C-alpha cells in the first residue's frame, strides 16, 4: 500500500467522523504497512492526522509491537502536539510502548499536565487520566500521587472526568 492511498481513504468528511478508518485498519497486516500509515501523522492535513492516529490506536490494541519502532516519534509528538485529536490518541498509545523509568517520568509529567489543564478537551483529559492509571500499574508505582491528582480534578465537578475518576478509584480499591 502507499501513503497516498491511506491519505485518500482518510481525507473525506469532517473532524467529527471517522470516514475511512475502519477500512484502513483492515488493510494493515504488516509492520511495513503500519510504518507507512504512521508516516501519515506528519501530514499537514489535520483530518488525515486525526484519522491516522485513530487507525494506529485501533491497530495497536491487538498489535502493540508495531509501535516499538516508533517509540521515539511518539514521545516527541507528546511534547510538541497541538491538536487535541492527536493528543487523545497519543495518551492511549503511550501505554502500549515499553518505557524505562526516565521515559515513564517524562510521559507521566505530560499526561499529568494534560489532565490538569482546564483548557484541554475533556476527551484528552479523560484519556490522560486513564493512561496515567495504566502506566502506574504497569510500572508498579504507588498510586498516592495519582489519587491526589484525581482528587484535585474531581473538585472541578466535570461529569465526564468525575465518572472516569470514580471508575479508576473503584479499580484501585479492588486492587488493594
Image (tube, rainbow, N blue to C red):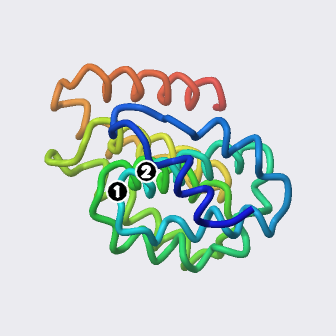
* Disc 1 residue crowd, few under 14, some 14–19, many 20+, Cα 10 Å: some
Instruction: Give the Cα distance between marks 2 and 1.
Output: 6 Å
Q: Are marks 2 and 1 in contact (CB under 8 Å)?
A: yes
SS type, badge 2: helix
Residue 151 image offset from top left, x and y in percent? 29, 36
Above or below, 73 relative to 31: below
Above or below, 169 relative to 159: below
Residue drawn at 48 percent across, 56 percent down: 90
- Is residue 132 rendered to the left or right of residue 174? left
- Is residue 123 rendered to the left or right of residue 98? left
Residue 119 image offset from top left, x and y in percent? 14, 48
Q: How many marks?
A: 2
Q: Residue furthest right?
A: 30
- Is residue 63 rendered to the left or right of residue 24? right
Q: Which residue is mark 2?
A: 50
Residue drawn at 38 percent across, 50 percent down: 47
Q: Quadrant of the N terminus?
A: bottom right
Q: Please give the label number shown on residue 46.
A: 1
Residue drawn at 54 percent across, 49 percent down: 92
Place residue 125 in its image quadrant. Answer: top left
Above or below, 5 relative to 129: below
Amino acid at each position: 500500500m502507499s501513503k497516498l492511498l491511506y491519505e485518500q481513504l482518510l481525507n473525506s468528511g469532517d473532524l467529527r467522523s471517522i470516514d475511512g478508518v475502519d477500512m484502513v485498519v483492515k488493510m494493515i497486516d504488516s509492520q511495513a504497512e503500519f510504518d507507512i500509515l504512521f508516516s501519515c501523522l506528519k501530514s499537514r492535513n489535520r483530518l488525515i492526522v486525526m484519522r491516522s492516529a485513530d487507525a494506529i490506536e485501533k491497530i495497536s490494541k491487538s498489535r502493540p509491537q508495531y509501535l516499538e519502532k516508533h517509540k521515539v516519534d511518539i514521545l516527541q509528538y507528546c511534547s510538541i502536539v497541538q491538536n487535541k485529536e492527536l493528543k487523545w490518541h497519543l495518551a492511549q498509545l503511550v501505554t502500549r510502548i515499553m518505557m524505562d523509568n526516565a521515559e515513564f517520568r517524562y510521559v507521566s509529567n505530560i499526561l499529568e499536565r494534560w489532565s490538569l489543564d482546564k483548557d484541554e478537551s475533556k476527551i484528552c483529559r479523560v484519556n490522560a487520566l486513564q493512561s496515567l492509571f495504566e502506566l502506574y500499574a504497569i510500572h508498579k508505582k504507588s498510586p498516592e500521587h495519582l489519587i491526589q491528582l484525581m482528587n484535585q480534578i474531581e473538585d472541578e465537578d466535570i461529569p465526564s472526568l468525575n465518572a472516569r475518576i470514580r471508575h479508576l478509584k473503584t479499580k484501585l480499591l479492588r486492587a488493594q
